[in-house]
Image (cartoon, rainbow, N blue to C red):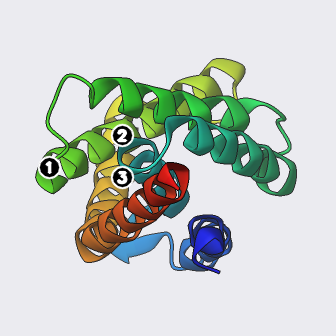
Amino acid sequence: MIRFLVIAISVLLFYLEPIFGLFSPVELNSDFYVLVPRFLIIYLIFVAIYYDRKRAMLYGLFFGLLYDVFFIDIIGLYSFIYPLMCLVASYTVKYIHQHLLVSTILTLLLVAGVELLLFLFYTSIGIKTMTFTYFYQHNLIPTMIANAVFLLMFGWAFKYILLNRFNQKALLLQK
């Protein structure tokens, strides 16, 4: 049963993202701030860092394709970005330490990269018509704060679960 825990958490986070998306936008002082939950990509980056790069990329491709089909109707956008971020994370940790703080910072940078790639794509095809300053102040910063809170709450649990699963997998391969 424990071997299905990694995929079960992925499925749970995939379903939780739109639920938390219902709380956005938030109005403060007559300005609207958009909080985009990126729980799944955060978890997939942790899977790439602490468990298995190949598996993280496969999950990223699968859930990215599901996200494309169910939420945005542009097939290929998330199914390209999710595995790309997992690949970048796995290659980056080869050169830096896998400490939780370093992984947290790397994850937040990659989530910011996801948001910037999506902003550039949507503005280039004309879906979004906003300036970069407006995007930065009203979308990127609130999104990063919300995802940082999520990561601070659950990052240690993700690391613990994935490292335990990795150790169980290594023990099974030794037998």
Look at 39% across and 59% down and name the residue there: 167
For numbered disc 1, what is the local secondary structure? Answer: loop
The type of residue carrying mark 1 is His
Relative to 70, 48 lies left or right: left
Do the residues bearing badges 2 and 3 touch, measured as CB atoms within 8 Å?
A: no
Work out whether residue 140 or residue 29 is closer to the camera in this orientation and state it. 140
What's the CA distance linking mark 3 and mark 1? 31 Å
The type of residue carrying mark 2 is Ala
Q: Residue 47's x, y, as percent?
A: 46, 51
Number of the front mark, 3 or 1: 1
Number of the front mark, 2 or 3: 2
Relative to 70, 1 lies left or right: left
Residue 99's tag is 1
- Residue 134, placed above or below residue 144: above
Residue 112's tag is 2
Work out whether residue 170 or residue 41 is closer to the camera in this orientation and state it. 170
Do the residues bearing badges 2 and 1 touch, measured as CB atoms within 8 Å?
A: no
Q: Residue 44's x, y, as percent?
A: 50, 51
Work out whether residue 20 or residue 153 is closer to the camera in this orientation and state it. 153
Name the image quarter holding the N terminus.
bottom right
Work out whether residue 52 or residue 70 is closer to the camera in this orientation and state it. 52
